[in-house]
Amino acid sequence: MKTRTLLILLGFTGIAGCAAPGKAVVPPPPEPRGTDSRALGHFIDAKRFKIAGRIEEAVESLRAAIAIDSTAATLYNSLAHNLIALNRLAEAGEAARKAVRLEPRSAAHRWLLYDTLVEGQRDTLLATAQLEAITRLNPADFRAYTHLLQIYTAGRQRQDVLRILDRAASVPTRNIRFDLLIADGYRRLNLPVRAAGIYRRILHRDPEQAPIWNLLGDLTLAGGDTLKAATIYRSGLAHFQHRLNKTTLTLWKKLIAIYDRENHLEALISETPPDTLFLDRLSIHLPQSIPRSGAESGLKERRYGHTEAVLERLIGVFPERHDLLGRKASLLLDTNRPGEARDIFRRALSLDPDPMYRLGVAHSYLNQRDWDPAIGILNGLFGETPADSELYARIAFELGRAYAVSNRTAQARDVYSKAVNARPEDLRFRLAVGRTYLAEKNWEAAIPELESLLSRLEDDPELLEDVLYDLGHGYERAGRFDSAVAVFQRLLARAPDNHQALNYLGYMFAEKGVRLGEAEAYIERALKGDPENGAYLDSMGWVYFQQQRYREAMQFLKRALNAEESRLNKIERKFRTAGQLENLSIILDHVGDAARALGNVDEALEHWRRAAELAPENESIRRKLQSFRPNNASGP
């Protein structure tokens, strides 16, 4: 066997590094007793020389001591240590051998000999023999087991590895890291039952070892017993009262992934009697595991369905628990079933007059764009809820939004103004007041309202960024171009990745036909934040148009048109907002301009006609249609 195999950690590196050092740490030898006084004097001199760093003189003193008394193993041990310090490993090995011969039951001498054999004489066979002897002398010396496992694993000596693992496993210990080393060894030998036994031994001593529950469950899952693995993960969670936190997160993830498999959740729900505490926690944690990405729509639907099934089982057992009904109703709202949600919220209300359930009923109407009953409920809640309630702000914003989206901006402003008076320290309400003026395109009223907030928001960076964005928008619409540029640049200095602000500022320059290089750079950064945003693609297309790069402009404008139409197609016609239709008309207008610049007259007319249908009040588009002549089709 080559010497370098002694240093190969292979599968044991990760845990063995913690369980045992790479080199034995041997305590300094005791003073030799019953030794000739002259030898003892030389030994003491050697100690002084070593402390002073005069190692050569220490060696000479020890040799003088041994010449007087060659029966003291301690003298040879000390000599070996000093020779190692001088890197005279062969001589050190000879001294260590003599120490072992004189005191063969001393593990310290054998560790010293092992070090010299590994580092100096490269005698692997004798080095291994020392480790084997150490484990017999001191069955709890786990450093020795670790080195033996490294050696036998490197030499692919399976039977020796198994022998050492079994011997180590038989030693009573509370050392979790060493137990994990043994279990990992069994797993590598494809002995999962023995590995599981070690994991269970650890858990018997300390059941609150979440990583061990994970390992035991994983081992069982790898063996194909999915339901037993689920039971193990559940047992682990039970020791943490089924909480969801950093400690238990992995257990929950693995368990929920098992329930994603066909029939596994059904097996849980059909248990008799049901584990209602576990089902209760699962009904709370399952929705938190639902992915937000549309790319995982199948998984989203499955987990929503599983959550509903768990809640149904619990409600069947506890029909009077209003909190379960409330959870189910909220789930139905999330899955766009507002009518069913409303019925369940009302059932919950019949059991408990919790305002959250009334708020849920209001949300069910809002989801159906049925504004009046929603506003009626929210108005009632707004009048009843104290300003210091945790629900107050939520109710105020929901009511204001309901008024705003139903084109009752003045009523929305009245709600927000009352909230400002009730909670003057909450500046979000004053921002909401300013936004009602923006919605009415009353720039002269919106701007001072927003400006008044600037000096009061230095300690609230997120809200300050919202105010700066709205103020920049107000300045731009009011024709105060330079002020708008300054505000957006201030915002980007604070939040350089705010892609909405990047796009807005870039588009402002593009519209003016100024600083087009900066405009392109801003919009490129915006597109990094949202690559398929129709408005951003349109802005980039318009920059290229202003640079007379018409073909590149058309590529981006067509992408913008496809993105915006795709987004609108997912919204029922009656639910599309005026702002969404305005955005589409702007993109159609730009595509028409680019088509005309490229000489595609019919295409330009078709896009302008569509833009005019969406924005009949847009004089610019109407003039293009009215004044268009074939001889004007060569360029903008």
Image (tube, rainbow, N blue to C red):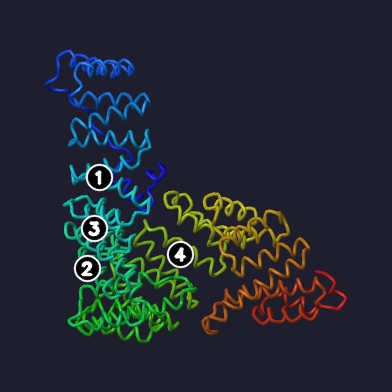
Where on the picture, by quarter, is residue 32? top left
The nearer-to-camera label among 1 and 2 is: 1
Residue 543 location (% of width, % of height):
71, 62
Q: What residue lies at 62% left-to-right and 65% top-to-bottom?
A: 536
Q: CA distance from mark 3 to mark 4?
A: 50 Å
The nearer-to-camera label among 1 and 4 is: 1
Callout 2 secondary element: helix
Answer with mark 1 or mark 4, whichever residue precedes in sequence. 1
Asked if 138 appears above or below 613 in the picture, the reply is above
Disc 4: which residue: 432
Would you say 1 lies left or right of 560 here? left
Q: CA distance from mark 4 to mark 2?
A: 50 Å
Residue 534 location (% of width, % of height):
61, 70
| Marker disc for residue 209 | 3
Would you say 528 lies left or right of 43 here? right
The image quadrant where one finds the C terminus is: bottom right
Residue neighbourhood size for the residue with mark 3, other residues' Cα within 10 Å, grouped as few (<14), some (14–19), many (≥20): some
Give the camera-side residue of 562 and 293: 293
Residue neighbourhood size for the residue with mark 4, other residues' Cα within 10 Å, grouped as few (<14), some (14–19), many (≥20): many
| Marker disc for residue 235 | 2
Q: Are marks 2 and 3 in contact (CB under 8 Å)?
A: no
Q: Are marks 1 and 4 in contact (CB under 8 Å)?
A: no
Answer with mark 3 or mark 4, whichever residue precedes in sequence. 3
